[in-house]
Image: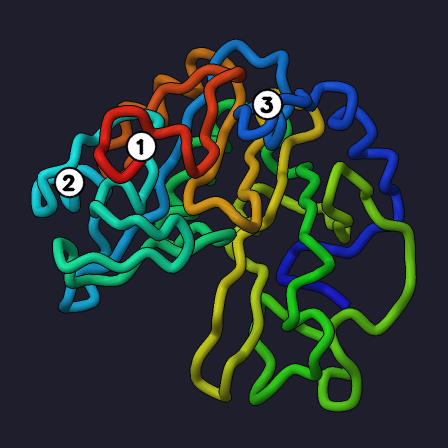
Amino acid sequence: MTFGELVLSDDVELAEWIRPRLGSQFGAVNRTVPGGFEAYARICHPATDSDGALVSWPEVAAVTGGHAHPLMQWHALIGSPYPVNATSALWPGENPERGNLAPEVLEVVSGVLAQHTTMASRCTFCLWEGWGWLHAAPAGAPHPGCVSTSRSQHPYLDRDGPRVRLPGRDYLLLTGPVQSATSLGWWLDPTWFQAQSPNLFWPTDRAWCVATEIDFDSTLVGGTRALIDALLNEPTLDAWPIHPDDCVALDGDRLNPGG
């Protein structure tokens, strides 16, 4: 089974460096992405407006009267008392997706990442084994990003094997080039491919690490100062500077009324 240029691997020792560098404080950035990097960034997943167009959180704040800042939380930004499945009359569009960075945004991020490692063609990817689509038979025609010779008879996850085991999550491990970060996903029907961003990925030289926790509506990146500056200065990204011990939990927004 392959996912584009990504190949499943049993070499879970490739991820052993991560656990010792994870913090223990609930909600801290370094509980999700490893500590020890020069700098960190938070990339907020885009919301969609009433017409279905992607919009940034500052654009939403301009509508709701909220305050956009590095540790903002979505429900607080739109003035909702409900941290999960937030709804508010102030925002008529859709919420950002949790656990998945939009592929068009991830493609931009991957392009920046590739310029800040000597190993862009040799990266390691972790995919949470609990995604339902991994346990269901693929539907419709095969996609270049998700090819299985037995796709009509077996689920994607059709074998046992070693797992990367980190606090609270077990992952499949894959290897391949950074550009293949957008290759993961499944077919909802013969014409609709649903992309799934990796939950963790990093290059062999460990110049950076990207984490998309399944319950978060933002993606966290640790890396060199030059990389983080490049992400922050990329105009198409809703990226914010953060620190490894900053709190990104649902109650971590201290500036918006709903937080």
- The answer to whether mark 3 and mark 2 are in CB contact below 8 A is no
Q: Amino acid at mark 1?
A: Met
Q: What residue did someone put label 3 on?
A: 30
Q: What residue did someone put label 2 on?
A: 61
Classify mark 3: residues with Cα within 10 Å, few (<14), some (14-19) or many (20+).
Answer: many
Specify the quadrant of the image occupied by residue 95: bottom left
Q: Position of residue 70 (x, y in %)?
A: 32, 25
Q: Is residue 136 above or below residue 152?
A: above
Q: Which mark, residue 72? A: 1
Pick the front one: 94 or 150: 94
Q: Quadrant of the N terminus?
A: bottom right
Q: Position of residue 197 (x, y in %)?
A: 53, 53
Q: Residue at x 37, y 42 (%)?
A: 108
Specify the quadrant of the image occupied by residue 251: top left
Q: Is residue 37 above or below residue 75?
A: above
Q: Amino acid at mark 2?
A: Ala
List the single residue furthest toward the front.
81
- Count of numbered badges drawn on the protein: 3
In primary-sequence order, the first of circles 3 and 2 is 3
Q: Amino acid at mark 3?
A: Asn
